[in-house]
Amino acid sequence: MAYQQPAQAYQTNSITTATPGELTLMLYNGALKFIKQTKAAIEIKKWDKANEYNIKAQDIFSELLITLDRQYPVAQQMVLLYEYIQQRLIEANIKKDVAILDEVEGFVVEFRDTWKQAMILAKTQG
């Protein structure tokens, strides 16, 4: 139990001191983690856990939608993509369909990797 407190403190500190860009990257990584956990739970027929993890991934995309800076032209495209992912997550949750989750995971990996590159580019230019 003593190990949990320092780990939790580190995680909390990481979040509270992160830049907006780093927070977005954390959200993408969190979504990937929950998608993988959902798939694993489906494979062993733990429907309650699959639902729990899937909802956490959905919640992350709700947060990404809420915090999206809509002043940029690309934002409207991101809204559509995030909404599509949310719909597919819901469908995967209802059907317990790993193939849908594989599709969503592919999108999220692309978003994350593109975001990482954008962060690197921003650092080199700014």
Image: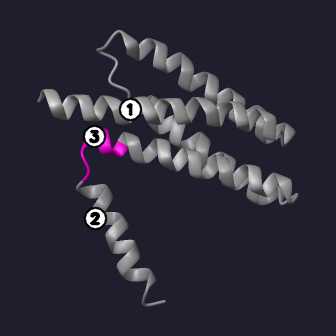
Of the numbered discs 2 and 3, the one sitting upstream in the chain is 2
* Residue 20 in magenta stretch: yes
Residue at the image position 78 percent from the left and 57 percent from the top? 41
- Residue count near mark 2 (Cα–Cα under 10 Å), binned few <14, some 14–19, many ≥20: few
Q: Is residue 113 left or right of residue 124?
A: right
Going 28% across and 34% down the picture, which residue do you hit? 119
Q: Which span is picked out in magenta? A: 18-23
**Residue type pointed to by label 2:** Asn
Q: Compared with residue 98, is residue 88 higher up or lower down, i.e. above or below?
A: above
Q: Position of residue 20 (x, y in %)?
A: 28, 40
* Residue at left offset 34%, top offset 65%: 12
Check disc 3: other Cα within 10 Å, few if <14, some if 14-19, many if 20+: few
Q: Residue at label 3?
A: 20
Image vertical order of residue 19 relative to residue 113, above or below? below
Q: Residue at coordinates 54% horizontally, 36% vertically from top-left?
A: 109
Residue at numbered disc 1: 115
